[in-house]
Every structure is written in C-alpha cells, then in structure tokens.
Image: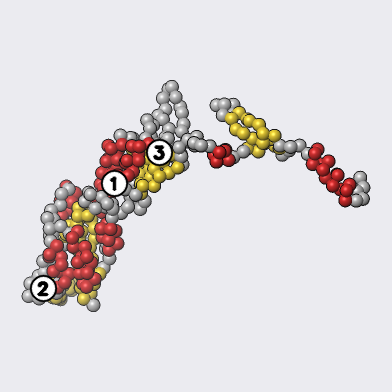
Amino acid sequence: MDIEDTGELLKHAVDTAREFPRPEIDNVRDPRDGTEAVVALTSTGLVPLDPAMFDKWRTDPLVRKGTADLTTIDSFIALVNRFKQDNSAIFALDDPQEARLTAIFDYHPAVTDAQDEARNLRHRAIYNFPLSDEWKAWSAKNAEAMSMTDFAAFLEDRIVDVVADAEPTTDAAKAFVAAINGRMATPTKLIELARGLQVYENSVLKEARNLSSGEGQLTFDSQHVGADGKPLQVPNLFMICIPIFARSPDFYRLLARLRYRKAQGGLVFWFELWRADMAFEQAFTDACTRVADETALPLFTGTAEL
C-alpha cells in the first residue's frame, strides 16, 4: 500500500492500533493447592502482576512481616513474648564474631501424620550480642608484647577488672594452675611489677667433659635475679572478672598467664588469656538458657531457613 500524505499515515496507525489485541486481566489457579494468581494476557503470553501493587490500597496488611532489631536482651524477650505463637521458634548463632538470636514468629509447625503445613517465615526479631568494653580491651591486648610503661598504663586503666580473690572456680582452671605451679598475682602486686620491676641476669658458662672419650660439652646457664641478687619469684598468673556481653549483669572469671622477658630496651611484658573461648561459650549458653526459660519457646543452635 502506498501512503502519499500525512492523513493517510495517521489513519493507518489508528487502524493498526485498533487491530492490536488489548491485554486482559485473568486469574490462574495452582492445581496443587488452589492458590490463585492475577495475570495479564498479552500478545506475548502471561505476565504475572506484582501482588505488592495492591498493598498501597489496603487499610490493613494481609500478614505480619518485617524484622525488628533489638539492642538489649530484655527488649528481645519482651517482644518475643508479645508476638509469639504456638509454632514460634528461636535460633541462636554461636559464632563469637557475630553471635545473635533470631526469633521467627511465623515458623513452621511440627510435622505430624495429620499435617504438613508451612509458613512464610516473614515476621522476625533479632538480637545481636554486643561485646563488652572489658572483653574487647583484654582481647585486643591478648599476647601482645608491651614495654613496661605501656603495660603499666594498660593495667592502671583496667586494674578494676583484676580480682584480689584469685582462686580459680572450675575444675579445669584448678588443674591448669596446679600443672604449671601457678603463683597468682593480686592487683597491687601487678601494679608494683609493671611500675618497678628490675631484672638482673646472672650468666654462667659451664663445661662438662667425658674423661674416657675426651668429648666436651659447654652449657650456658642464665638466671634472672632481683636488685638484691636473689632469684626473682615473679607471679605467673592473675585473674580477671569481666562481663562478656555489654549491659550484662553476669561476670565471668578468666585466668591470664603473666609473661615477661629482658630485651635490649628494657623489660617486655605481655599476658595470655587461658581458654577465653570457654568463658564466651558459658556466657552465650547462660543467655540462651535465660531466653528459652522466659519465652517458653524452643531454641535451636544455628541459623534458620532463609
């Protein structure tokens, strides 16, 4: 067909548009459970309509959904008790780097012979365990060599964490102290050591010779002594008592090994926390036990389905 002027071009466009099929709205049904979905029938096939487009017109949502982020464990427990249902559940992630609790209010019911139902898992609450300033301070300096000045400054800042009653309370800690012949330091003794310990080194070269073979052996004995020339009896352990999580009323005891060595620029001090992972696990377990008791919900260690 030859189009010679603009009028005929417009008429041809209008006629073509009228002949083009218009989309129709229809419902399709899932044969498995009868769920209906709204679709548009177009020239290219079925196009599903986004269900969220209807939400702006609702006065009330169809279901509860969203995730509440709580900053205290008390608030987490209170919110769980507010929204929990018969099938709600709590999941505890026991990773020291990102320990958290997740409550899923619309969790799946238990499977029985009579039912095999599923829920959407869209209504949740989480609590990310915040580490205490005390835990972060001691962990940051753990096994880090410090000069006498730096070690004294650190101890002065954190001396309230060191306990005078330094007896271990667990069987494992008692066994460790006995195994290394532990000598516990009080807070006062720690400060005295860090501020004014003087170490002198007595070195003796010894020779041992086998008279029958003529073979000889040289040994070099080194001993640290104090200013009075007597062998030093430096405590090799101290105890701290700190909360693991911020805003927690619960405190936990941790053993720390006290180490030092004589370096070119003077004495170098450091400490090594003994089995800090055990203290973290105990604090996490205690918190989970409290949550399970006060919410009366099942608590599973791990992460839930996405």
Residue named by callout 3: 104
Residue at position x 45%, y 42% in the image: 66
Distance from disc 2 to disc 1, alpha carbons, whole Å, reads 44 Å
N-term mark: 2 or 1:
2
N-term mark: 2 or 3:
3
The residue type indicated by label 2 comes to Gly
- Image x and y of residue 276, in percent: 26, 54
Q: Is mark 1 on a helix, strand or loop?
A: helix
Q: Residue 226 carries which label?
A: 2
- Image x and y of residue 147, in percent: 23, 72
Residue at position x 40%, y 36% in the image: 105
Left or right of 22, for residue 63: left
Left or right of 88, for residue 203: left
The residue type indicated by label 1 comes to Phe
Determine which quarter of the picture holds residue 225: bottom left
Between 247 and 237, the one lying in front of the other is: 247
- Image x and y of residue 112, in percent: 41, 25
Q: Which mark is residue 153?
A: none
Between 243 and 189, the one lying in front of the other is: 243
Between 299 and 262, the one lying in front of the other is: 299
- Image x and y of residue 46, in percent: 67, 36
Nearer the observer, disc 2 or disc 1? Answer: 1
The residue type indicated by label 3 comes to Ile
Determine which quarter of the picture holds residue 181: bottom left
N-term mark: 1 or 3:
3
Residue named by callout 1: 284
